Image (cartoon, coloured by chain):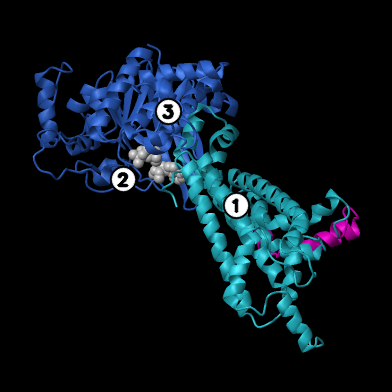
Chain colours: A blue, B cyan
Amino acid sequence: MTPLLTVDQLTIDFQTFAGPVHAVRGVSFDLAPGETLAIVGESGSGKSVTVRALMGLLAANATVVAGQIHLGTTDVLRQSAQAFNAMRGNEVAMIFQDPMTSLDPTMPIGKQVAEPLRLHHKISRKAALAEAVRVLELVGIHDAARRLKDYPHQFSGGQRQRIVIAIAIINRPKVLIADEPTTALDVTIQAQIIQLLKAIQEKLDTAIIFITHDLGVVAGIADRVAVMYAGRIVEYGTVDELFYHPQHPYTWGLLEAMPTLNTKSKRLFAIPGTPPDLLAPPVGDAFAPRNPYAMAIDLVEAPPFFPVSETHAAATWLLHPDAPAVTPPPEIQRRYAQWAAHELGGDAND
Amino acid sequence: MGRYLLKRLGYLVLTLFIVASLTFFLMKGLPGTPFNNPKLPAEQIALLKTQYGLDQPVWRQYLQYLGGLMRGDFGTSYQFVGQPVSYLIASRLGPSLQIGLQAMIVGTSLGILLGAIAAIRQNTWVDAVATIFAIIGRSIPNFVFAALLQFLLAYQMHLFPVALWDDGWASSILPTLALAMAPLANTARFMRTEMVDVLNTDYIELARAKGDSQWQAVARHALRNSLIPIVTIIGPMTVDLMTGSLVVENVFAIPGIGEQFVKSITTNDYPVIMGLTLMYSFALTVVILIVDILYGLIDPRIRLTGEVA
Ligand SMILES: Nc1ncnc2c1ncn2[C@@H]1O[C@H](COP(=O)(O)OP(=O)(O)OP(=O)(O)O)[C@@H](O)[C@H]1O
Ligand SMILES: [Mg+2]
């Protein structure tokens, strides 16, 4: 299928007093209509910056140094400000992290939900509000018609995130970006919001980019996963490939750090060390200083992507034919065993 | 809302009662008398004192004064013999009210505009110019502005009357501008800070994500939210205007309340001073009440109930 969205070698710097921060360093991915791509990575890895570039909502001190984004045939980064305004909230919409602060506290929610309709279509106020009621009911706000005049503070956090979702989907966007939409919510509400996003996707056939640093929620929603580290994608593949056949030591670390039902100790494993300073990213593999499997070449040259399957690739020198065989951590070996046993991907050659 | 208003009106009366009592006893405690002309013979002074009831015990004078207030009688001026204080105030309220209101409207609306533009064009030359303008407006006293405006626009360019209150609306323009400087600078500074904060909020980002252009996001979402805290400084700004008016009216020789106030202080005209103090207190408490009601109107998170003090 031809992709709906392609991001090609996107490179973004922020000008700061200390010098340019290389926040995104050559990110490429694509998105098929109706699919869900999860972008996973630690704080500061460049997930938000990447999608903000797509929305045209980068901070004033940001420069797109290189790369392209195509939405259908539109060259997103080279369109005028007006064309960007026309695209935002219409073809591409976004849900933010904190529902408590995402809504205008002084405007009734009906007006806020109807606003994107009024912006992008010639439609009367009454018709727009009627549509707002329909969409609010769709996202699970009961008795929406009677609540149109209510203000955000009259709703709970979960309800507010539903309202934010209603705002995002009212124009039936082709791409819905969800930037950690459940991080600020408690666990039961998280699950409801994920369910809601899945239901909406089925109904509207929207493609979703789901950003999170919690691998736990990824399995429930994504078709494919891209793992980001220090401004780069280091591994991508289908959910099964990433969860049961991961190749990059950073992905291993993330999976080890993921709490599971049979995690016995209260203390969670975290990847030791901190991400590199993006003012001066290290030569070679940015993950090398934290990587117990790092080799000499990691300090010299950044690894290219080595394909693992048609849908799966990882940027680690461990996949180079000349690299020595390494033994992954026990948790990953356990996953490899499951991969082999369930023949999830056919040949489990490890 | 009804209960709330009733409660607030109760507080208003209480405030005025306290102000009236305080000023009364303060005036009594002051050393000067209105009849301290050394040329006046003693029996003349005694006569005057009897005439104004000043020979009575203080508690009786106090009760009489309060009783008079209840009936809307603020007493009689010492300086303008036989003139009731209420008449003196009423006849001079017009010009003061006019330049005060004009200055408030011009000052706050230009201030809001200036502050908003400075915030939107943050850290550009526009912002720098607006900031310098605000600093000048805040640090230079309004009588300097008054004199400057008089000199430049009236004396040199002959655009407006230099002073006095005899040329209709044109007479009010320069005093209004001189008086508007402080609220303008204050609002601009406040507005810029608020707007910068609001422009960085998630809901403005969401507005942009909906497809709002920068100006649409400002007009629909940022402006109203930045205005909420501005409402709180209307009270203090009113005080500034009242005190500013004392000076500006004198500079422009406007027959207003401020000018009257200054004159009555220099002549120890106690009844007029007390009447004016009460009037200023009344005006201020009413402004504060209006501000609180406005607050409830523009911020849906605030509900006015009898519980709020
Ligand atoms: N306006 C800015 N000026 C300078 N640096 C910035 C700016 N915005 C982002 N950055 C930097 O870019 C990097 C990537 O930030 P980004 O917000 O994309 O991280 P993220 O992956 O979304 O993290 P999180 O999980 O915390 O949301 C960070 O190092 C951040 O400090
Ligand atoms: Mg982020």
Query: Quick check: can you spot residue B249?
Result: yes
Tell me which chain the residue with mark 2 is part of. Answer: A
Q: Nearer the viewer, mark 3 or mark 2?
A: 3
Q: Quadrant of ligand 1?
A: top left
Q: Nearer the viewer, mark 1 or mark 2?
A: 1
Q: Specify few, some or many for label 3: CA neighbours under 10 Å numbering under 14, 14-19, or 20 or more.
A: many
Seen at 33% across and 24% down, the residue is: A37
Residue B287, numbered label: 1
Is ligand 1 closer than 8 angstroms to the Cβ of mark 2? yes
Q: Of helix, strand and loop, which mostly describes the magenta segment?
A: helix
Q: Is residue B232 left or right of residue B170?
A: left
Tell me which chain the residue with mark 3 is part of. Answer: A
Disc 3 element: strand
Q: Earlier in the sequence, mark 3 or mark 2?
A: 3
In front of the other: A141 or A166? A141
The answer to whether A121 is drawn above or below residue B292 in the figure is above
Distance between the alpha carbons at the discs numbered 1 and 2: 56 Å
Which region shows up in magenta?
B135-163
Magenta span has B136? yes
Residue A94, numbered label: 3
